[in-house]
Amino acid sequence: MPLATTRRAGLVDQVIEQMRGAITTGEWPVGQRIPPEPELVTALGVGRNTVREAVRALSHAGLLEVRQGDGTFVRATSEISGAVRRMCGTELKEVLQVRRTLEMEGARLAAKHRTDAELARLTELLHKRDAAMEGEQWAEVIEHDTAFHVLLVQCSHNTLLAELYQGLTEAVKASVAASVDTSQPGQDQVSHTGLLHAVRDGDQEKAAIEAGGFFEELIEKFC
């Protein structure tokens, strides 16, 4: 979405919305430095103070991160994800507790509503995750594990639950990265096999228990 010059009324709000749009659409990806202030001033047709106020507001919301001497970087794609990502260091326990709540219900519903195609994709992702663990390919472990959890909740076929969890994808990935113990061999990592089998077998209660169980294990181990 190209940035456009703004109308005079509500300049800061307009700039905030345009910049938020560039973030949420992926034009400015998470982790990337946004254009420098002079470039934004020219593109938006506003003054430096207006741009600075917009950056300050988006930083407060958790979407941007200002790094002195290095520029401003995209931190998250939504306010809720940005808020939770701030907890992923010192407040990892809280992130895992939120995930546990959402994923227990997601797993229970997935056991009832998942399709064969979704089960096949879950199986594929878990296989890739476990293979990456055996090879100690930790970046791939994080990618596949995150994708597995996101798809699991999508398999609930509860639109609101899936959208809530999707909004936390970056926080989920950060918490996965924080809780992967790279000092341990693959076979000693948390297993999701029991969860997958419960979803496969349509055992709703076992699926919920399995989902809650490995979060308890992670909380006890890392928090």
Image: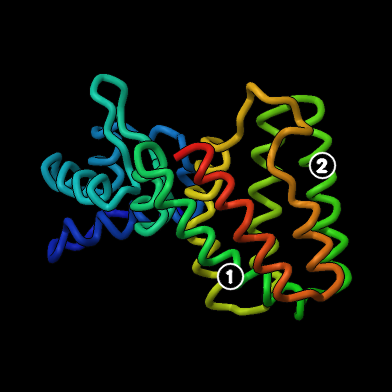
- At label 2, the amino acid type is Lys
Quadrant holding the C terminus:
top left
Q: CA distance from mark 1 to mark 2?
A: 23 Å
| Residue 199 drawn at (x, y percent) | 79, 68
The answer to whether 218 appears left or right of 28 in the picture is right
User: 96 above or below 141?
Assistant: below
Under circle 2, the secondary element is helix
| Residue 13 drawn at (x, y percent) | 20, 61
Q: Quadrant of residue 155?
A: bottom right
The colouring scheme, among rainbow, by chain, secondary structure or one colour, is: rainbow
The answer to whether 117 appears left or right of 212 in the picture is right
Instruction: Please name whichever residue, 29 or 174, is drawn nearer the observer in this view of the structure.
Output: 174
Image point 81% across, 29% down: which residue? 134
Image point 85% across, 55% down: which residue? 123
Image point 55% across, 73% down: which residue? 161
| Disc on res. 128 | 2
- Which residue position is annotated with label 1? 162
| Residue 208 drawn at (x, y percent) | 66, 68
Instruction: Please name whichever residue, 69 or 195, is drawn nearer the observer in this view of the structure.
Output: 195
Q: Is residue 3 visible?
A: no
User: 203 above or below 173?
Assistant: below
Image point 76% across, 31% down: which residue? 186
